[in-house]
Amino acid sequence: MASDFSRTLALLRREKRISQRTAAGDLQVSQALLSHYENGLREPGLSFVVRAADYYGVSCDYLLGRSMSRDGGTALTPAPAESGEEEAAGGAALNKKLVADAACVLLDAAAKSGSQQLVDELTTYLSTAEYKLFRYLYAADKSNPSEAFRTDEDRFDALCDARMKLTELRIRCAANGGGALGLKQEKAELPDLSLAALPDDYPGRAESLLHVLQSVSDSIEEFDQTTRKKK
């Protein structure tokens, strides 16, 4: 909890553009203690967490790193099902909504930037990932002929990986206006993608994207040795 809380606490103060001294006074703690909280040297009590959440207008879950949505909300989950098949169907429907909504937000943000190059590169990346995943599922049924695809089964995934890594570089380049990696230079102005702005700009879909971000963040954290050491 310490690393998420301290990082978020400091970020919220900077966003509010107030000094540590001012925030400490408003939160009824000494500046030294607030500094310890923001640097992860000490963990706060519950009363301070609640006070800080009210002060910055966020939920305690957001402040503690349990949710990437500032109001603490997450994407809606389906109601408990009576049978295993219904439960599986409900889970599949939810996952479909999460992934589809998240992709829509990304593509819409790219379109709003005014860069067709960025839209094209994002589309290429997502399409390549879908191709790769389909090939995995297709190959699981041994009765499906591998000859249906031009690229051999033992090479397609590595080639997709190579294509996706290049596309990742081109996406980053296009988001900054191009001018390299075969992309023409142009003006690209992405909309506000701060976690605070997303729910207002993408009502409904933003919660799905935040859910995906939180889920992936949790899943990759176990591989990040620096993150684990901070806890």
Image (cartoon, helix red, strand yellow):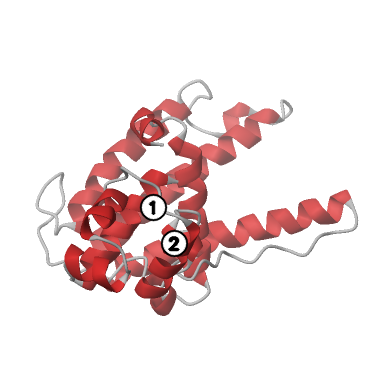
Task: From the viewer's perspective, tell me whether residue 223 is left or right of residue 169.
Answer: right
Q: Give x and y (percent) for residue 47.
A: 47, 63
Tell me the residue that label 1 is attached to: 5
In front of the other: 182 or 230 = 230
What label does residue 104 carry, if any? none
Task: From the viewer's perspective, tell me whether residue 67 is left or right of residue 145.
Answer: left
Q: Give x and y (percent) for residue 102.
A: 48, 61
Give the secondary structure at mark 1: helix
Task: Please identify the residue farthest to the top as the structure is shown.
Answer: 154
Q: Residue at x 28, y 73 (%)?
A: 26
Tell me the residue that label 2 is attached to: 49
Q: Are marks 1 and 2 in contact (CB under 8 Å)?
A: yes
Q: Nearer the viewer, mark 1 or mark 2?
A: 2
- Quarter of the image holding residue 97? bottom right
Q: Give x and y (percent) for residue 113.
A: 24, 69
- In the image, residue 171 sits, relative to residue 135, either above or below, namely below
Q: Give x and y (percent) for residue 136.
A: 59, 33
Query: How far, Cα to Cα, is label 1 from label 2?
Result: 9 Å
Q: Residue at x 25, y 70 (%)?
A: 25
Going by the numbered disc 2, the residue's amino acid type is Val
In front of the other: 142 or 92 = 92
